[in-house]
Amino acid sequence: MSRSRILAAMTVAGVVTAVTVLGTADAGAADPKVAPGGNFDLSVWQLQEPVGSPGSPTTISSSRLQGANGFQDSYFYTDTRDGAMTFWAPEKGVTTPNSNYARSELREMNRSGSAADWSLGGSHRLSATLRVVSVTSNVCVGQIHLGSGGSSTKPLVELYYRSSGDIVVGTENSPSGGQTTHTVGHVSVGKTWTYTIAVSGGNTIDLTVNGSTTHYPTPSSFFPYKQYFKAGSYNQSSSDSTTKGARVGFYGLTVSHG
């Protein structure tokens, strides 16, 4: 991978930590002729697709995603026009048992191959450069999701893009449910934008959209839980259509822990 396509290490809380996912610095830097794994370090991600058996979507391991000849299909592929790592989630597709919505989405993993499951203490950051190519209604493009520590399968944070162009963050009120939403930006469909979802001090969520940062307290009921990041196209509408849905292209995707 050329130097122009590698994102440098990021500084988090004054400590330089190695970026665990390398993405392209800009749209022009990506190679449109290779699989997503040729432009992005996917060794710390697992892919879930909207196919498989009912309640059990197909997952693709990080080992299969990696490299220029890595996995790609109609739900996860490199856009041959600009090199974007593209996720397609139709309104009709296989879902997890706890959701009515289909997704083509990455789930954070450890380099060892185990599922990422980190505590709220310390600094944790997910950053992306992306564009929503098309969306029927609403799509989630980034999450902090609950891991071990209890029975809840809720997300702590979900970042949505709506067909109106509004960018909305949803913060969960408690592990048992209820979400509060905040509009944090506006970008026309098809336009490139950036986000960073971060946790600092163990009790604060820091969200940056196109350079503007807002902060949200983490309810204490989440403290027993560990967490992990997700990113991609998690469609928020369903129907019998396999042609309507949400298509999202990523030009940069990085994760850091410190």
Image (cartoon, helix red, strand yellow):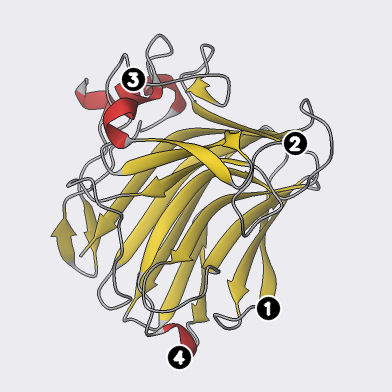
- Residue 161 position, x and y percent, is 68, 50
Camera-near label (2 vs 3) is 2
Determine the image quadrant of residue 239.
Answer: top right
Determine the image quadrant of residue 224.
Answer: bottom left
- Residue 120 position, x and y percent, is 33, 76
| Disc 4 and disc 1 in contact, CB within 8 angstroms | no
Closer to the N terminus: mark 4 or mark 1?
A: 1
Q: CA distance from mark 1 to mark 3?
A: 39 Å
| Badge 1 density bin: few <14, some 14–19, many ≥20, Cα 10 Å | few
Camera-near label (4 vs 2) is 2
Name the residue at 37% across, 13% down. Answer: 34
Q: CA distance from mark 1 to mark 2?
A: 25 Å
| Disc 4 and disc 3 in contact, CB within 8 angstroms | no
- Residue 163 position, x and y percent, is 78, 45
Q: Is residue 82 above or below residue 105?
A: above
Q: CA distance from mark 4 to mark 2?
A: 36 Å
Q: Which residue bears the numbered disc 2? A: 92
Residue type at numbered disc 3: Gly
Q: Which residue bears the numbered disc 4? A: 220
158 vs 68, left or right, is right
Determine the image quadrant of residue 32.
Answer: top left
Residue type at numbered disc 1: Gly
Q: Which residue bears the numbered disc 1? A: 178
Closer to the N terminus: mark 2 or mark 3?
A: 3
140 vs 16, left or right, is right
Q: Is residue 216 above or below residue 80?
A: below
Q: Between residues 42 and 83, which one lies in front from this camera angle?
A: 42
Q: Which residue bears the numbered disc 3? A: 70
- Tell me the element at label 2: loop
| Badge 3 density bin: few <14, some 14–19, many ≥20, Cα 10 Å | some
Q: Is residue 133 above or below residue 69?
A: below
